[in-house]
Image (spheres, rainbow, N blue to C red):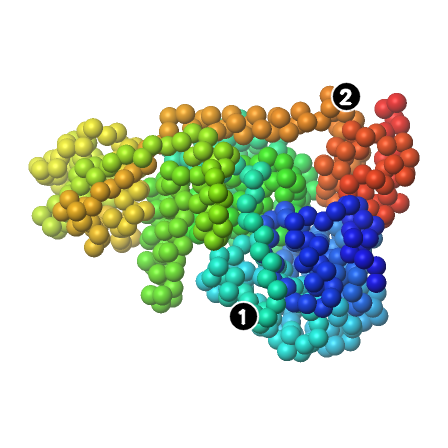
Amino acid sequence: MESALDVLRRVFGYDAFRGSQQEIIEHVIAGGDALVLMPTGGGKSLCYQIPALVRPGTAVVISPLIALMQNQVDTLRELGVRAGFVNSTLDFDTRRTVEAEFAGGELDLLYLAPEALASAGTMRLLERGRIGLFAIDEAHCVSQWGHDFRPDYLNLSMLHERWPDVPRIALTATATSATHKEIATRLGLDGARHFVSSFDRPNIQYRIVAKQDPRRQLLEFLRGEHRGEAGIVYCLSRNSVEKIADFLKDNGIPALPYHAGLDARTRATNQDRFLREDGLVMVATIAFGMGIDKPDVRFVAHFDLPKSIEGYYQETGRAGRDGEPSVAWLAYGLQDVVQQRKMIDTSDGDAAHRRNLGQHLDAMLALCETVECRRGQLLAYFGQELGKPCDNCDTCLAPPESWDGTIAAQKLLSTVYRLDRERGQKFGAGQCIDILTGKKTDKVVQWHHDELSVFGVGTDLRDNEWRAVIRQLLAQRLLSVEGEYGTLVLTENSAEVLGRRRTVMLRREPERAVSAAKTAKASRQNAAAALPKESVGVFEHLRAWRAATAKEQAVPAYVIFHDATLRQIATDRPRTLSELSGVSGVGENKLAKFGQQILDALAELD
């Protein structure tokens, strides 16, 4: 058999493996089962693609990403890899052709959706061919407590029962220790070798800002730091997606919507444009993103609070797959907390399910409210240690203060107590803040709340500071919300604060948070400056050639070559095919297909 390193060089054009790739690949080639936890952009795909090219037979890849199978297959075919897929998007004749190629041993990789394995026809097809290995991608989808649960993943343990001698590799970029164990148990991989890489993505800067005017904040973030760059904006609802996409377009930013309420053709068109065109912003619900391998996504922005750290990490991981500086930006406010608590209280499922949702939210809120390094806290959630502050998150770049908010908490909780116990009333945050700050609004006067003993006792804090206090008391479960209108109520822990038995430490937003934005922008400029001045024009000329070639072949530009490869070509200025073959990312097939075109493009500049 050809060695794994030879395949890496010949097909993919790289001289060396990264991290634990080689150990994983050699283990699977030898017939061993593997469970791989590796961050997005860490090179998970090579861990099954290279064994697929070395082992006899066809690798069957189980992927939940029907909408992206065509892009994945196109990418592999550009490398000279014989890849195909079978799913509901194929017409009858095309499907029969792919099935015949598999049965005839003419495919290196065959992609299937997990739902397909419930079909007797698919099982008969697999029986007709020789299977070299099973790769189960996005393996966290098997977790019933997870954010991307897919019921059909629960049936994948039957692969080993039916083909006990075929090695399996399960891969994911997102898993807590509990999810890790659940994947192993449900897929029957307890006896497999487990490979766990660091989840750290040092090129991503994590920033969480307090919501004030979130649309304006988002617009300033995009205009000030990411004008003309590709990125994703996540929203919680379909309605919000439509409104934010329209808002961005009205303000001169090319944006596309994506959510499950759009028809399949519109979703496919918008996704395809995002992958193929430069500088587009996709505004989406979490229905979009898993498996998106566009390398130059420079930012992921969350307009609403994610439901869990797993979801947040998975979504932010779609930025900076090329290793270049990128930003994960989240706007977070009181209403987010109220809305999430209400959604949990009214969710389907039993008490254990709601308790699990609450624990996910608590961890997310703790990340938002921390005064420590965000990256360190994020990694700690996944059972990993950073060791020292990262110096590339907002709490490191512009450290917030921690202050003793016990008295403020007592004032707020007393207001809620008096409204409930003395008046038999429940109100939301706005009314409580008006009472504390002594505002005689029509509503305050109507309900005689200006007669309460707490009226006007909170004038030492501004309205937005009181909203931050309420938000943090909700996060610490010293306060809760109930009902359709999100009224504030005390919890069993409130008495400890009112009884002066508990100190409440709160976070104060730093005044110089803008410096984090400047640092992020500067870091990208420094990355661009790494290209020699005389090579900048060559690089742009090569990008123009790539764009035209990609359009001609109807594939995304990164399928032709990544920016990193073009930068090295622009710097080295190879004169022969032999010299070009030494550039990282130029494999045998791409050299044959595009090598002379690149040399001709370079010659145009002489």
Q: In percent of the image, x 35 and y 49: which residue is there?
A: 339
Please name the residue that numbered disc 1 is placed on.
Answer: 186
SS class, disc 2: helix
> 449 left or right of 116?
left
Q: Which residue lies furthest to the front in this view?
A: 387
Dot 1 and dot 2 residues touching (CB under 8 Å): no
> 451 left or right of 176?
left
Q: How crowded is mark 2: few (under 14 residues within 10 Å), some or many (20 or more)?
A: few
- The C terminus: image quadrant: top right
Tally of numbered discs: 2
Q: In percent of the image, x 85 and y 24: which residue is there?
A: 605
Please name the residue that numbered disc 2 is placed on.
Answer: 534
SS class, disc 1: helix
Residue 413's x, y, as percent? 19, 44
Residue 203's x, y, as percent? 58, 38
Q: In percent of the image, x 81 and y 57: which residue is there?
A: 3
Q: In percent of the image, x 80 and y 54: which residue is there?
A: 7
Residue type at numbered disc 2: Glu
Residue type at numbered disc 1: Arg
Is residue 403 something one can see in this rendering? yes
Residue 188's x, y, as percent? 58, 72
